[in-house]
Image (cartoon, rainbow, N blue to C red):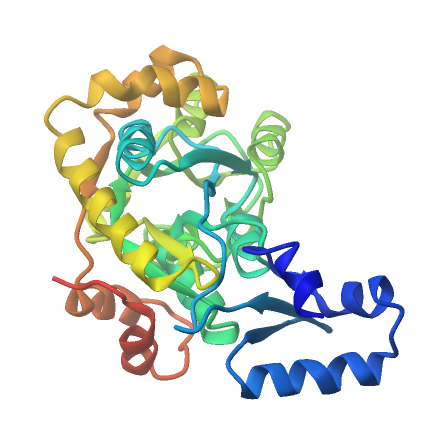
Amino acid sequence: MLEALRARAGELVPQSYLHKSLRTSRSRVSEVLSELEREGLVTRVRVGSQYLVKLLDFSGEPVGRLKTLHVGIVWSSEYPFLSLFAKKVKEKLNAVIKISVFASSVQATKALVLGDLELALTPAITQLYFYAVFKDFKMIGGGAYGGSKVLVKDSVNAHTTYSSELSTMDLVRSLTTREGIIPTDTLTKYFRSPEEILKAAYTGAAKYVVVWHPIYRRLEEIGYREVLRSEELGVTYCCTLAASNTVPKEMRRALSRIYRESLEEYVKAPEKWVEWYALQVGIPRDVVADSLREYRVNPSLSRVELYRYASRIPIEIPSINTILGDLLEVEE
């Protein structure tokens, strides 16, 4: 069994794969893996109805240096700093950053907890909820904030508000509704992709929308006007960088340092890093360049600030302080 795991060192291997490839009974595979766990040679993570197995070395860290790091993001103009981060990771760790673009933050964070990604830049609120359930990743870096707006189209009769779900947009929607900016009698509808919200807007189904750059530029072109920006509500965290626990702790710490350095260098000349990022996500260069005026960089992770942020989430999550204590790997 160890040989089968060594052949896939550095990967999360479904327990069912071992049963089938070794032609051994499920009970025998489970028995052997339990013994290997006690000896500190493997670790198992339960995801849904299946177990994923990881080979460990004697220090309890996953075997196999990661040469490719897949970073999950939401389709957005928010992350040009990933260009510099990718450059530094290659120089310092000899690893390649590959960007995977998702339609929503829920999809991207789900891919992280399922082991399909090593890293994810998704909203802090999404990570808090997923961590409360799965606890198999760590938050290792800040990111950008701003770049989102509440818009309204006065000519639309529908009493609806469109937002992405379990995201910064959702938090902004909730805060503006509680403050009476969006009428409380409007019906909230969640969109799962940029295409879906654009369709709702073009067909007159959405009166209020809470969206990010560059989507709001498209909506402003068809008559939507700005009600407010997310910064006006004091939302100073949007997406933060999370790393899967399948990435060795030492490497997570190194990535955290490199990421912070990248953000601090990026703000000095952000326009230098637009080209590569635009090609990766399929957004025109001029649109990404326009976003540089919309987003602000927040490289730090502060437990105090994240607690204040989480305290504004309307649905209480179990013990915010406890979750932040476990979730934060670096803190200033």
User: In front here: 297 or 258?
Assistant: 258
**Residue 264 percent location from the top left of the image:** 13, 38
User: In front here: 180 or 115?
Assistant: 115
Quadrant containing the C terminus in the rendered view: bottom left
User: In front here: 250 or 129?
Assistant: 250
Please indicate whether residue 293 sits to the left or right of residue 217 in the image. Answer: left
Q: In the rendered image, is residue 323 in sight?
A: yes
The answer to whether 128 is drawn above or below residue 273 in the figure is below
Q: Residue pushed farthest front?
A: 3
Q: Residue at x 50, y 38 (%)?
A: 207
Q: Residue at x 59, y 38 (%)?
A: 193
Please indicate whether residue 54 sits to the left or right of residue 329 in the image. Answer: right
**Residue 319 percent location from the top left of the image:** 34, 84
Q: Residue at x 43, y 48 (%)?
A: 120
**Residue 117 percent location from the top left of the image:** 52, 49
Q: Residue at x 27, y 77 (%)?
A: 325
Quadrant containing the N terminus in the rendered view: bottom right
**Residue 169 percent location from the top left of the image:** 41, 48
Please indicate whether residue 44 sits to the left or right of residue 269 in the image. Answer: right
Q: What count of labels does the image hold?
A: 0
Res 250 → quadrant: bottom left
Res 93 → quadrant: top left
